[in-house]
Amino acid sequence: MNGYIVGDCNYMESVRRVFRREKTLTIEALIDLENLVIKDITLSGDFFAYPEELFEELEDSLKNMECRKAIEILESYRDKLMLVGASIDDIELFIKEECLKD
């Protein structure tokens, strides 16, 4: 992944992670490590999403979602949502690396 983690704060069994890939994509997530649940996630940066409403729906659907299910949700948006300057792959890789790592 061509980016870097810029934050790592522990909250008991949860961890807050921030990923930045240049200026185009920032992912901030609060992950419950014990239960492997994305408690909160924010996707932002210098990219375009079309349709915008579908992007907001995707972001909301990832919140309070079990990590493996979140990847399935991302896949369901792959053919419906167009991202320019970022990709579904970027978000999926972040979830795999930060939420499902051994």
Image (spheres, grey):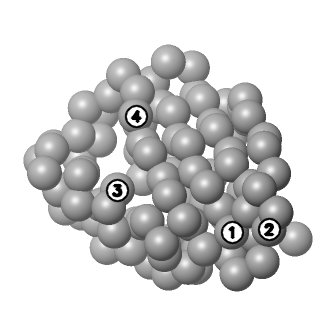
Dot 4 corresponds to which residue?
Answer: 44
Marks 2 and 4, how far apart in space? 25 Å
Amino acid at dot 2: Glu
Query: How far apart are the two marked residues, 1 and 4, measured between alpha carbons?
Result: 21 Å
- In this rendering, position of residue 16 left or right of residue 25: right
Q: CA distance from mark 3 to mark 1?
A: 17 Å
Query: Residue at 42% across / 42% down in the picture?
Result: 43
Q: Which mark is residue 83?
A: none
**Marks 3 and 4 in Cβ contact (< 8 Å):** no
Which residue in the structure is indicated by mark 2? 13
Q: Amino acid at mark 3?
A: Glu
User: Looking at numbered disc 4 in the image, what kind of residue is underneath it?
Assistant: Ser
Query: Looking at the image, is mark 3 or mark 1 earlier in the sequence?
Result: 1
Which of the numbered marks, if any, corresponds to residue 59? 3
Residue 9 figure quarter: top right
Q: SS of the residue at dot 4?
A: strand
Q: Secondary structure at mark 2?
A: loop
**In which quadrant of the rendered image does the C terminus lie?**
bottom right
Question: Helix, strand, or loop for circle 1?
Answer: strand
The one of 55 and 30 positioned closer to us in this rendering: 30
Quadrant assignment, res 21: top right
Mark 3 vs mark 2, foreground winner is 2
